[in-house]
């Protein structure tokens, strides 16, 4: 894999925000900061349209700092938010969809997503912070969490209010659709796994691939179960990896985080191997601790820090990721769930 976003990579190593970059005559990258967590920023891609106007791929986290970064980035390339005609959203997460509503208010731009993610954002549970919290707590309890621990990890409804107000989609993009941005041939590639409706965009004139969070150059995107998600998200993700790699090598991969690169097939192979290693580690944990819940099994896996330091959203991601791997092991016939309200897992007898 070759790093092509050298300025992004250098900024990452310096723990700094990378610069606004002109990637082609008609294409720029604008970093929009994320206020917490390890990802630091999301890259919004700005596309010039013939005859005037701009298109966006992803918008950034909805905060005043993020809005300023996006506005200043557009100004640096000679435009403004009011020039935006359309917003393509790779997936429903707040660092990608968050600012779409403010962009639409300032410009009248349409917002497009895959129907699976658009449906989640528009669902009554998602639009109601209290209902959203209750659903997530109940889901974690179904994975073996103590109700009080689950409630503490999820947090109060007021913390979820910003997510409930995210922009609803004006347009839906199915797999294979071409986005309505004149001068570009951006074909939607449905890549479920990270979210049910994750989209990559393959630009057919230039050979560029805007990969969202589906393929990142350094980290593996979180693949987790959700109360309103896919039944077997890891199986969907691995199939999506193979499908993207099978499209052939793009001229460059433009991800939503970290840095641009070449060598898609090599990176998809690495990501698939990572998950196979994780599946093997989890199967060993199930054999060593039969009758355990996903919540319990997560504590027996290798993480980036000691398990007792995991709490809140980090612990939720770890447990739901463990559950996603268990479901794939089950679909391969390697583990068996108890079938109770809170399933416990044992290795299948072979």
Image (spheres, rainbow, N blue to C red):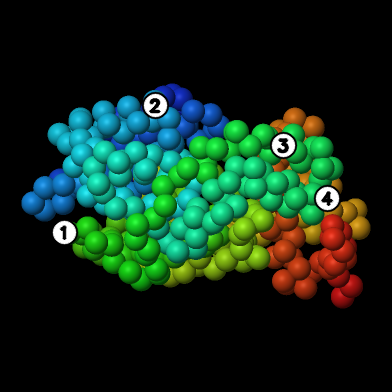
6 in relation to 342, above or below? above
**Residue 316 picture quarter:** top right
Compared to residue 215, the image places residue 230 above or below, namely below
Lateral position of residue 251 relative to residue 266, left or right? left
Q: Which marked residue is nearer to the observer: mark 1 or mark 4?
A: 4
Q: Which residue lies under the disc numbered 4?
A: 144
Q: Residues within 10 Å of mark 3 (few under 14, many from 20)?
A: some
Mark 4 secondary-structure assignment: loop
Mark 2, other Cα within 10 Å: few <14 / some 14–19 / many ≥20: few
Mark 1, other Cα within 10 Å: few <14 / some 14–19 / many ≥20: few
In this image, 336 relative to 50: left or right? right
The residue depicted at 27 percent of the width and 31 percent of the height is 71
**Which residue is labeled 2 in the image?**
64
Name the residue that disc number 3 marks. 153
Q: Quadrant of the C terminus?
A: bottom right
Q: What residue did someone put label 1 on?
A: 183
Along the line of sight, the residue nearer the viewer: 347 or 45: 45
- Residue at 80% in and 37% down: 149
Do tag 2 and tag 1 residues touch (Cβ < 8 Å)? no
Q: Earlier in the sequence, mark 1 or mark 4?
A: 4
To which quarter of the image does residue 37 belong?
A: top right
Cα separation between marks 2 and 1: 32 Å
Query: Looking at the image, which residue is at 73% across and 56% down?
Result: 323
């Amino acid at each position: 894999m070759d790093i092509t976003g050298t300025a992004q990579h250098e900024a990452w190593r310096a723990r700094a925000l990378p610069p606004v970059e002109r990637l082609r005559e008609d294409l720029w990258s604008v970093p929009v900061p994320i206020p917490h967590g390890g990802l630091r920023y999301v890259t919004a891609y700005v596309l010039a349209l013939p005859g005037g106007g701009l298109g966006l791929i992803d918008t950034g986290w909805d905060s005043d700092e993020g809005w300023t970064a996006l506005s200043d980035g557009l100004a640096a390339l000679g435009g403004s938010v009011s020039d935006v005609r359309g917003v393509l959203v790779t997936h429903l997460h707040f660092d990608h969809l968050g600012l779409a509503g403010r962009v639409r208010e300032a410009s009248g731009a349409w917002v497009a997503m895959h129907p699976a993610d658009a449906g989640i954002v528009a669902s009554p549970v998602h639009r109601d912070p209290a209902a959203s919290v209750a659903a997530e707590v109940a889901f974690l309890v179904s994975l073996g969490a103590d109700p009080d621990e689950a409630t503490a990890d999820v947090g109060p409804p007021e913390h979820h209010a910003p997510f409930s107000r995210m922009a609803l989609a004006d347009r839906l993009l199915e797999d294979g659709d071409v986005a309505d941005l004149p001068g570009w041939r951006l074909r939607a590639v449905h890549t479920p796994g990270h979210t049910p409706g994750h989209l990559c965009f393959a630009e057919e004139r230039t050979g560029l691939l805007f990969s969202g969070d589906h393929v990142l150059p350094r980290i593996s995107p979180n693949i987790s179960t959700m109360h309103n998600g896919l039944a077997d998200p890891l199986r969907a993700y691995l199939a999506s990896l193979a499908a993207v790699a099978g499209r052939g090598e793009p001229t460059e991969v433009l991800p939503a985080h970290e840095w641009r690169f070449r060598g898609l097939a090599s990176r998809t192979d690495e990501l698939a191997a990572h998950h196979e290693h994780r599946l093997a580690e989890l199967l060993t944990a199930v054999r060593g601790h039969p009758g355990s819940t996903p919540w319990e099994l997560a504590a027996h896996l290798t993480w980036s820090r000691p398990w007792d330091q995991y709490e809140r959203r980090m612990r939720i991601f770890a447990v739901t990721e463990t559950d996603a791997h268990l479901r794939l092991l089950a679909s391969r016939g390697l583990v068996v769930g108890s079938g109770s309200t809170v399933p416990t897992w044992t290795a299948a007898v072979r």
